[in-house]
């Protein structure tokens, strides 16, 4: 007879670990107990040595499906002659190093119960089990137990209690367990907030949707705005009320058959769609899809997703399985609405009807958005289902760190030891609401994860809210600051994700990032590791007439590029002569014309030249349309480019003037926009590969890390990767974390940790 004390770290709470351990111990006739503590799970178990070995082995080899074990340690104890195995109350005192489980979509078994008329949870909108249901969005504190979630207010009924206590039941010890009798209640509200009495709120809500109205539906991490995706006037109304001019809206399809009717998903995309995280997946839209044009105007792709809550399943059933627009309930770029007390105020005039319930959402969490690039996942936005699962670092952080991200597509990250907790999608830190939400959510993570950061890493841009927030943390909380150059953070994000110590050559192509020389960077080749970097090459700088205004009006950048290449703009810029003159005068005098090496702006400029877009609906939109255009053609040759300085002088400059001249030549010959787009993409891939080869000769570096928002362009990244692999490089792309600014926080954190480690704690600023 032996007794062992076992400590397990990892994502082991909220994933059915305790009931699993009870079942296993019982089968092996072992006695003892299991309980959650503030770091993970603690087990004491006694029995004969062979059974104990089998017990440990089984936990490691076949843990519960949603669990991720990071460490398992055991020590011998003196046997105490226990006869049964039980779950004990959670241990709330002691060290706190919890990992928090992310929300999980309704599992197959629960979906079956949901539509089984003999099941006592038939059509219960809050059905869940140990394998599925809300987690991160309902937990208020760790350890994960019902009383520390927003389910605390719902006392289990007798029948639920019996299941909860029955080790043979598949809902044994499920913290989110409830039923029609004891669970949260749905409520249907009219536009004015008055309650609508109805026998079945879901059916009544569905009828409103089918009648062409816009609904607000309470989901896991916030409200969605919902309408019939086939109904053009409903979708157009949703767009105008939400003040969302052009960005595509996501569509929820009931099942595979409904999905196949709207898009052509590759096997990898289908796998992503069915993953328990249920992200929105950008898949090729079927030409004959019955989807209103306003869902994704001028897009070849549609953001599709499958139902992930019981309420979604019931709603899609009630509308007869037609596709529904399902988009974050917010105005413009404001944060998603998630609190009932704010919903009617903020969505007044937007939603015609509200379907809500009385289980509070503890923290908002937007849907994740992913795509498949060469059968690898690439995140546009990593949020619900993934946050707050940590990225495992290859190093230990000397002290707890907070990294605050940039300005757009913001996530923040907290780190302790070798865990980087990258937050859900916070969004653009432009409005007051977004900034307030950001500060609140940082505090929530600090409390939940038990991390008190001593170091705050931030972008170098002085005007970003996140930078100012970091400075305030330093002033008030005494945290030390680490400023991280924007593109260095992108490089470090890729290195951290791949657990590379460096050095590597980072090809970082994005829209905008503050350079230490006070110019705007964005087409960068950096050699470095997490600690430091050298800018070894960049795109030729051109003036950005009007600064930010040029991002919204790419024709301005096109004009600047033409003039820079010594070409007359009149023929190729479709703007009134007076507008041209104003911008030309700005360029002549250098007024409000910051210099930029941005790759994003190069894409914008050429998209404007071929007449695709004179203005951008949002940043990156012209480049996306340009990629789609290019995909209509096969590879059709390349334009020319040049290097401005010798290979051994730093930094090397990639001269894009020959490229612009060639584009203009093609335009003059009446070449099609699609061919120009295709040639342009090939040219960018060609000069990336050529630059990497030159830099390899000069610096002997073989590893290339690709990051930055421009690499959301599938055509470009696949072409670049292929050329680099052919040339013998090792290529690293981002797959766990977005390559866009949603990945900055992870990089900032890695840079801060590396600087602390190499310079010591006092000198890291
Ligand atoms: Zn389930
Ligand atoms: Zn119940
Ligand atoms: Fe960036």
Image (cartoon, helix red, strand yellow):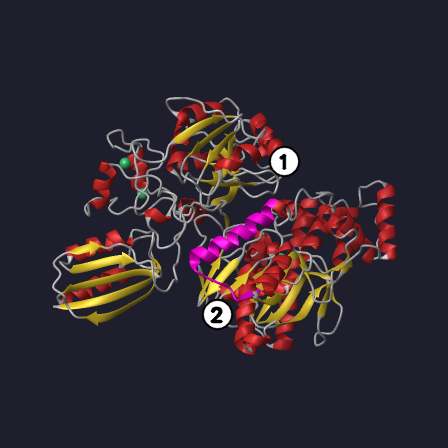
User: Which badge, 1 or 2, is on the more N-terminal residue?
Assistant: 1
**Toward which corner of the image does residue 43 lie, by quadrant?**
bottom left
Q: Residue 148 in the image: x percent, y percent? A: 36, 49
Q: Residue at x 54, y 56 (%)?
A: 412
Query: Is 411 drawn above or below residue 726 in the view shown?
Result: above
- The residue singled out by tag 1 in the image is 243
Callout 2 environment at 10 Å: few (<14), some (14 to 19), or many (20+)? many
> Image height check: is 516 above or below 612?
below
Which residues lie in the magenta part? 433-456
**Residue 453 magenta-drawn?**
yes
Q: Nearer the viewer, residue 12 or 741?
A: 12
Residue 90 at x, y percent in the picture = 29, 55
Residue under label 2, please give it. Answer: 397
Q: Residue 398 appears at what percent x and percent y?
A: 48, 72
Q: Residue at x 65, y 61 (%)?
A: 686
**Nearer mark to the viewer, of 1 and 2:** 2
Q: Quadrant of the C terminus?
A: bottom right
Tag 1–tag 2 contact (CB < 8 Å): no
Res 568 visible: no
């Amino acid at each position: 007879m032996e007794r062992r004390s076992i400590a397990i770290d990892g994502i082991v709470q909220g994933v059915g670990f305790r009931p699993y351990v009870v079942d296993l111990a019982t089968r092996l006739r072992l006695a003892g107990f299991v309980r959650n503590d503030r770091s993970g799970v603690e087990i004491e178990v006694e029995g004969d040595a062979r059974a104990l070995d089998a017990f440990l082995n089984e936990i490691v080899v076949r843990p519960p499906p949603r669990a991720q074990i990071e460490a398992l340690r055991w020590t011998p104890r003196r046997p105490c002659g226990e006869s049964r195995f039980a779950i004990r109350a959670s241990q709330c005192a002691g060290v706190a190093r919890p990992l928090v489980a992310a929300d999980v979509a309704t599992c197959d078994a629960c979906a079956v119960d949901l539509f089984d008329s003999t099941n006592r949870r038939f059509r219960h909108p809050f059905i869940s089990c140990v394998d599925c249901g809300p987690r991160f969005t309902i937990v208020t504190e760790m350890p994960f137990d019902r009383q520390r979630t927003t389910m605390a207010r719902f006392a289990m009924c007798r029948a639920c209690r019996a299941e909860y206590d029955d080790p043979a039941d598949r809902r044994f010890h499920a913290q989110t367990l409830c039923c029609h009798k004891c669970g949260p209640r749905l409520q249907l509200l009219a536009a004015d907030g008055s309650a609508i009495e109805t026998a079945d709120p879901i059916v009544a809500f569905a009828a409103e949707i089918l009648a062409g109205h816009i609904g607000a539906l309470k989901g896991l991490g916030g409200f969605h705005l919902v309408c019939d995706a086939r109904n053009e006037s409903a979708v157009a109304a949703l767009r105008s009320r939400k003040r969302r001019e052009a960005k595509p809206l996501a569509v929820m399809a009931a099942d595979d058959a409904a999905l196949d009717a709207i898009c052509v998903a590759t096997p990898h995309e289908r796998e992503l769609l069915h993953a328990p995280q249920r992200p929105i997946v950008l898949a090729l839209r079927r030409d004959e899809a019955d989807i209103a044009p306003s869902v994704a105007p001028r897009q070849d792709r549609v953001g599709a997703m499958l139902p992930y809550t019981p309420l979604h399943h019931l709603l899609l059933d009630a509308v007869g399985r037609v596709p529904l627009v399902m988009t974050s309930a917010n105005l413009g770029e404001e944060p998603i609405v998630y609190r009932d007390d704010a919903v009617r105020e903020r969505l007044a005039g937007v939603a015609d009807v509200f379907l809500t319930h009385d289980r509070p959402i503890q923290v908002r969490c937007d849907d994740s958005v992913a795509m498949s690039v060469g059968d690898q996942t690439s995140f546009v936005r990593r949020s619900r289902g993934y946050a707050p699962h940590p990225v495992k670092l290859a190093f230990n952080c000397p002290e707890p760190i907070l990294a605050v991200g940039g300005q757009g597509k913001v996530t923040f990250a907290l780190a302790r030891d070798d865990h980087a907790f990258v937050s859900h999608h916070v969004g653009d830190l432009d409005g007051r609401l977004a900034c307030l939400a950001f500060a609140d959510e940082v505090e929530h993570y600090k409390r939940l994860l038990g991390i008190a950061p001593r170091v705050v890493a931030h972008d170098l841009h002085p005007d970003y809210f996140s930078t100012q927030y970091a400075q305030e943390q330093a002033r008030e909380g005494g945290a030390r600051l680490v400023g991280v150059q924007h593109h260095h953070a992108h490089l470090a994000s890729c290195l951290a994700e791949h657990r590379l110590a460096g050095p590597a050559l980072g090809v970082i192509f994005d829209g905008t990032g503050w350079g230490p020389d006070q110019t705007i960077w964005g087409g960068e080749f950096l050699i470095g590791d997490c600690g430091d970097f050298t800018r070894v090459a960049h795109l030729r700088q051109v003036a950005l007439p009007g600064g930010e205004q040029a991002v919204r009006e790419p024709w301005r950048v096109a004009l600047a590029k033409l003039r820079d290449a010594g070409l007359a703009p009149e023929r190729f810029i479709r703007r009134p002569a007076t507008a041209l003159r104003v911008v030309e005068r700005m360029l002549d005098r250098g007024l409000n014309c910051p210099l930029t090496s941005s790759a994003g702006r190069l894409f914008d400029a050429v998209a404007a030249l071929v007449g695709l877009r004179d203005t951008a609906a949002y940043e990156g939109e012209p480049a996306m349309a340009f990629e789609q255009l290019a995909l209509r053609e096969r590879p059709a040759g390349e334009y020319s480019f040049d290097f401005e300085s010798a290979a051994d002088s730093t930094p090397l400059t990639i001269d894009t003037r020959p490229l612009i001249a060639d584009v203009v030549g093609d335009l003059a010959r009446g070449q099609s926009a699609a061919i120009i787009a295709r040639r342009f993409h090939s040219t960018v891939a060609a000069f990336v590969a050529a630059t990497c080869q030159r830099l390899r000769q000069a610096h002997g570096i073989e590893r290339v890390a690709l990051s930055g928002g421009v690499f959301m362009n599938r055509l470009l990244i696949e072409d670049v990767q292929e050329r680099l692999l052919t040339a013998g490089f090792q290529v690293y792309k981002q797959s766990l974390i977005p390559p866009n600014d949603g990945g900055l926080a992870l990089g900032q954190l890695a840079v801060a940790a590396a600087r602390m480690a190499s310079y010591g704690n006092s000198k890291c600023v």
